[in-house]
Amino acid sequence: MKRELIAAIIVPTLGTAAFAQEVLPISGPVQVITPQVVYANPPIRGGYQSRAITTVYDNLSNALANGTGNLALGNCNQALEDVSFTNSPWALPYSGPRVISGCTFALFALGTTPNPSTDREFLVFWDPADVDYHGFSGPGTNMIRPGATPLGAYIFAISGIGTPAGQIHVTGLNVTLPSAANSVFVQVGWLSPAAGVPADWSNLSGLLDESCPNINNRGLVFASNSLASPGGNPATIGTTLPDFGRDILSGAFTSSPGACSDAGIFIGSANAPSTGGQNEHRQLLNASTGVQTQYGYQLLLEGDVAPPACDPDVNQDGATDQGDVDYLIIVIAGGPNPTNINPDFNQDGASDQGDIDALINVIAGGPCP
Ligand SMILES: [Ca+2]
Ligand SMILES: [Ca+2]
Ligand SMILES: [Ca+2]
Ligand SMILES: [Ca+2]
């Protein structure tokens, strides 16, 4: 049980088709039917039209090809990863709604084949205001504010995952980020079916799939999309700190943190993230590719991204007025275009009267096309 890293084979399974609900474990697509999401909170979505669904955080898509995607974390049933939208389409000052609607996450299983009667998988999304790797109330305390309400919590009862498990793709999530937050924390792991719907996700004591000390058959998969060196950012879209929370279920440790007495809770510490021992404020460095590399939890998040706002100051003189309309008319008529703007202002593929009309509308205070 001292072995903390267990190599697990993750078969590349993530397809490009956008199915409504799917999982892609090692043996091919398996539908995640709606009832398999047994709990979702909060089921609220704002009244706006969906735009393009795109990746807003990615520490997963390159991992199988680049040789880092087969590193699984044992001795724990849950992890807590920070996701910053720095280096993401959602980076502030992004002003549109930010709703996480899809997620791909990686789990591993050894021994018995996971099934809904013995295992459930969960994803919980936290407001960064409710989480601190250093301990929410100081060193030695829970990283998550006790009793806090998550931004969203999902339990999956997935059939058909073989051993080892792989990348699980789920859609239909509905997690709205606070407008001022440039990050979100993701709590992920394995829940006992007997746990039902936990009343307090900050404390899963007695509710995880395995008890403490665990038998090390259920874990989480880490990787580096970027092959960043130690201290760097393993994600290629978005950013994660080296830190993560690891709720250790090892019988090798007898004193807190990381002991059976705090199983189900992530215990914070003030120090830099540890690479070993029983400290639950951790980081993971590995050299599976021959070079020491910073790893993070293998995770990809998707959501709506509004197109960039249009710029009606097409002649770039600092004012938005009739001069811009005149400028666009000339460009569309085949005249000079010294500011090198794209005359297809409404982005419909043609440069014509419709663009002039759209520009007039924007200058009059209307929305960008
Ligand atoms: Ca991290
Ligand atoms: Ca713990
Ligand atoms: Ca102008
Ligand atoms: Ca046009």
Image (cartoon, rainbow, N blue to C red):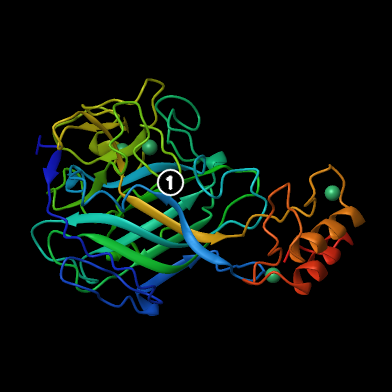
Foreground pick, 269 / 337: 337
Residue at 27%, 55% in the rendered image: 106
Foreground pick, 115 / 238: 238
User: The N terminus is located in which quarter?
Assistant: top left
Quadrant assignment, res 358: bottom right
Q: Position of residue 133 (x, y in %)?
A: 43, 32
In this picture, is 171 found above or below 206?
Answer: below
Residue at 54%, 66% in the rendered image: 52
Q: Is residue 12 left or right of residue 32?
A: left
* Ligand 1 closer than 8 Å to label 1 CB: no
Quadrant assignment, res 31: bottom left
Disc 1, SS: loop
Q: Position of residue 121 (x, y in %)?
A: 30, 61
Q: Which residue is mark 1?
A: 237
Q: Position of residue 128 (x, y in %)?
A: 53, 41
Amino acid tagged 1: Ile
Q: Quadrant of ligand 2?
A: top left
Q: Is residue 270 left or right of residue 64?
A: right
In this picture, is 225 found above or below 98?
Answer: above
Tag 1: Cα neighbours inside 10 Å, few (<14), some, or many (≥20)? many
Q: Is residue 337 left or right of residue 4?
A: right
